[in-house]
Image (cartoon, rainbow, N blue to C red):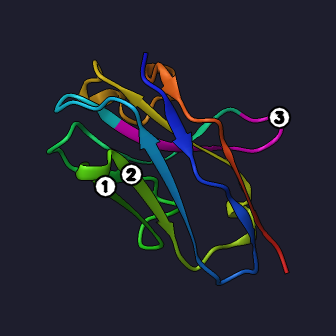
Amino acid sequence: QVQLVQSAGGLVQPGESLRLSCTISARSFSTTVGWFRQTPGKGREFVAAKFRSGGAIYYADSVKGRFTFSSDNAKNTVNLQMNNLRPEDTAVYFCAAGNSLILSSVRNAAQYPYWGQGSQVTVSS
């Protein structure tokens, strides 16, 4: 069983930055890790993902150029650096992992079997 533990979110003003971290208990070369976010009454929206350990990183158009996915393999940790935050980025953010994803599935939340506990990010003045 893979466990994911996320850092706390926070309350920031528009234009400010915040970094989320996610520590994964077991990670292999085939593990794909993604970040998703969810607002009340909506499904989980894709934010970013890294396909397997050595694969490319993909971003949603809404965050491209502002958010950066990074990983620290020695610590089994992935990070989501969020810059120039906007009120519409307000959501609960989740990290997720899976070992059997194919490339065409990285944006599909239903394909990830393992999830972190969620971190509330609120962007408000």
Q: Which residue is mark 1?
A: 71
Q: Nearer the viewer, residue 34 or 43?
A: 34
Element carrying mark 3: loop
Q: Position of residue 35 (x, y in %)?
A: 49, 45
Of callouts 1 and 3, the N-terminal one? 3
Q: Residue at x 33, y 29 (%)?
A: 26
Question: Circles 1 and 2: CB distance less than 8 Å?
Answer: yes
Residue count near mark 2 (Cα–Cα under 10 Å), binned few <14, some 14–19, many ≥20:
many
Q: Secondary structure at mark 1?
A: strand
Badge 1 local density, few (<14 within 10 Å), some, or many (20+)? Answer: some
Q: CA distance from mark 1 to mark 3?
A: 31 Å
Q: Secondary structure at mark 2?
A: strand
Q: Which residues are magenta?
A: 33-42
Task: Specify which label sits upstream in the sequence, 1 or 2.
Answer: 1
Kind of residue sitting beneath label 3: Gly
Amino acid identity at mark 2: Val
Task: Report the Cα–Cα distance between label 1 and label 2.
Answer: 4 Å
Locate residue 89: give its quadrant: bottom right
Specify the quadrant of the image occupied by residue 116. Answer: top right
Which residue is under mark 3? Answer: 41
Q: Residue at x 17, y 44 (%)?
A: 55
Amino acid type of the residue tagged 1 in the rendering: Ser
Q: According to the image, label 2 marks what residue?
A: 78
Quadrant where the image shows the C terminus = bottom right
As drawn, is 62 to the left or to the right of 54? Answer: right
